[in-house]
Image (cartoon, rainbow, N blue to C red):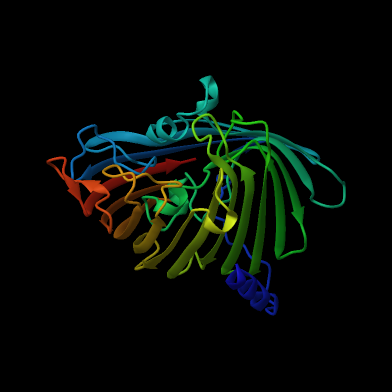
C-alpha cells in the first residue's frame, strides 16, 4: 500500500498533456457503428488450445478464459448495443462462449448471458458526473474479458481470481483532466444475485499523467459469507497497475495485488492472504507484427481463491512464463499464437497419466474480429 502512495505522489509532480491511453482493465473499449444516439458493435474471440498435460475432462484447471483443451471453440462473442444523449446512457452486451459458461455458472437463468447491462443518468449539466445502475465490467487488474485490448492473448492468473463483472451502482467523478474517481456500491465479489444481505464497497482511482502512461488503483471491501463459504467474513483487497505506451513500438504493463480474507473466529492479524505480481511486455517489429512476453507469480497458501486440485491443504504457489506472436490482419481482426509454461511449488497440476505434477504446458491459437 505504501508503494502505491509513493508512485502516485511522484506522478503528481509531472506536468504533461492529457492521456489517451485505453484502460485495458475495463470492457468499455468498443466504439461500434453510430446511428444517431444509438451505436451497435460486436466482438468474436475464437480459439484452439492444446494443453500437453491433456486433462481428461477437457477443462484447464484454474482458468475460466479460453480454457478448453483440444477443441476449436468460442471464448467470447457478444453484441454491444448502446444509447447515449446529453443526460442519459444505457448499454446492453449479451455474451456467449466458454468464458461465459465457466465464469457465470453461479448466476441464475438469463443473468449468466450478460457481459454488461446498465443504464445511467448525468447528474449535472456542466460536469461529467454520472450515476449508473446494473452490471458493469470490473476495474480490477489490467486485463478484462476482451482479449484484443491485451498484450498477450491468454489471461494472467491475476484477473481469473478477481471479479470480471460487478453488479450494483457506479458513481463516476472526473476530478480534473488527469484524475478520475469511480465509487461502486455492490452486491458482492462478482455477484449479480446477492449471496448475503450485506453490500460491498469498491473504489477506482485512475491517473493519466501523459499520453503514454496510466496508473490505476482499486480497493474492494465487503462481507463474503455465503451458503458455499459460511466461514468467510470481511474481505479486503487492493490492486495497482500501470499501462505504458500501448500503441508504441515497446509497450509494458504490470499489475500487483493483495487480498485479506477474514474468517470466523480468526483474528485480522492471522487472516489468510493471497497476492500476485506480473509483468507483460510487447515489441512491435512493424505496424502489424509484434511479439509479447509475460512473467508472473501467484501465491495463495490458504486456498482463499485457488484450491489445489491434488491436495487442498498444500496451497497454491505457481509461476508462469509465456511468449505470444501477434499479427494484425486488418484494422478490426487479429491472429495470435501463444505458448505458456507453468511451474508450481506445490504439484498443483496433473500429468497425462493423472498423477500430480509440478508442470503444465499450454499452446493456443486465436482469431479475433470486432466491429
In this rendering, is residue 319 above or below 370? below
Residue that protrudes farthest toward the right in the picture: 125
Left or right of 289: which side holds 257? right
Depth order, front residue of 48/8: 8
Left or right of 324: which side holds 120? right
Depth order, front residue of 328/197: 197
The percent position of residue 99, horizontal first and vertical second, equals: 41, 36
Residue at x-position 37% and y-position 61%: 297
Depth order, front residue of 155/297: 297
Q: From this viewpoint, is residue 32 visible?
A: no
Q: Classify the position of the N terminus by image quarter.
A: bottom right
The percent position of residue 283, horizontal first and vertical second, equals: 37, 68
Left or right of 307: which side holds 244? right
Q: From this viewpoint, is residue 136 visible?
A: yes
The percent position of residue 236, horizontal first and vertical second, equals: 60, 52
Residue at x-position 39% and y-position 54%: 301
Quarter occupied by residue 3? bottom right
The percent position of residue 108, horizontal first and vertical second, equals: 52, 22
Amino acid at each position: 500500500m505504501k508503494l502505491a502512495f509513493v508512485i502516485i505522489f511522484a506522478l503528481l509532480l509531472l506536468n504533461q498533456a492529457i492521456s489517451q491511453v485505453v484502460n485495458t482493465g475495463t470492457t468499455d473499449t468498443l466504439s461500434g457503428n453510430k446511428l444517431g444516439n444509438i451505436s451497435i458493435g460486436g466482438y468474436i474471440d475464437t480459439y484452439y488450445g492444446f494443453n500437453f498435460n491433456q486433462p481428461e475432462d477437457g477443462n484447464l484447471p484454474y482458468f475460466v478464459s479460453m480454457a478448453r483443451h483440444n477443441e476449436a471453440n468460442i471464448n467470447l462473442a457478444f453484441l454491444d448495443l448502446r444509447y447515449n444523449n446529453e443526460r442519459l446512457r444505457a448499454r446492453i452486451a449479451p455474451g456467449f462462449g466458454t468464458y461465459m459458461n465457466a465464469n457465470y455458472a453461479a448466476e441464475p437463468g438469463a443473468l449468466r448471458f450478460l457481459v454488461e447491462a446498465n443504464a445511467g443518468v448525468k447528474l449535472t449539466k456542466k460536469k461529467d458526473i454520472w450515476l449508473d445502475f446494473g452490471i458493469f465490467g470490473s476495474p480490477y487488474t489490467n486485463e478484462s474479458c476482451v482479449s484484443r485490448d491485451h498484450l498477450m492473448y491468454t489471461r494472467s492468473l491475476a484477473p481469473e481470481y478477481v471479479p470480471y463483472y460487478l453488479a450494483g451502482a457506479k458513481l463516476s467523478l472526473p476530478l480534473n483532466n488527469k484524475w478520475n474517481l469511480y465509487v461502486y456500491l455492490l452486491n458482492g465479489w462478482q455477484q449479480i444475485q446477492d449471496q448475503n444481505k450485506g453490500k460491498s464497497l469498491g473504489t477506482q482511482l485512475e491517473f493519466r499523467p501523459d499520453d503514454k502512461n496510466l496508473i490505476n488503483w482499486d480497493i474492494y471491501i465487503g462481507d463474503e459469507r455465503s451458503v458455499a463459504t459460511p466461514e468467510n467474513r470481511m474481505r479486503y483487497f487492493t490492486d495497482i497497475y500501470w499501462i505504458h505506451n500501448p500503441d508504441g513500438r515497446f509497450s509494458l504493463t504490470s499489475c500487483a495485488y493483495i487480498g485479506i480474507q477474514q474468517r470466523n473466529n480468526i483474528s485480522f492479524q492471522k487472516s489468510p492472504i493471497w497476492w500476485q505480481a506480473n509483468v507483460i511486455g510487447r515489441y512491435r517489429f512493424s505496424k502489424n507484427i509484434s511479439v509479447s512476453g509475460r512473467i508472473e507469480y501467484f501465491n495463495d497458501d490458504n486456498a482463499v481463491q485457488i484450491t489445489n486440485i491434488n491436495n487442498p491443504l498444500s496451497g497454491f504457489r505457481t509461476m508462469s512464463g509465456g511468449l505470444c506472436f501477434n499479427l494484425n490482419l486488418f484494422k478490426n481482426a487479429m491472429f495470435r499464437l501463444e505458448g505458456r509454461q507453468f511451474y508450481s511449488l506445490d504439484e498443483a497440476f496433473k500429468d497425462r497419466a493423472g498423477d500430480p505434477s509440478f508442470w503444465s504446458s499450454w499452446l493456443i491459437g486465436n482469431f479475433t474480429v470486432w466491429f
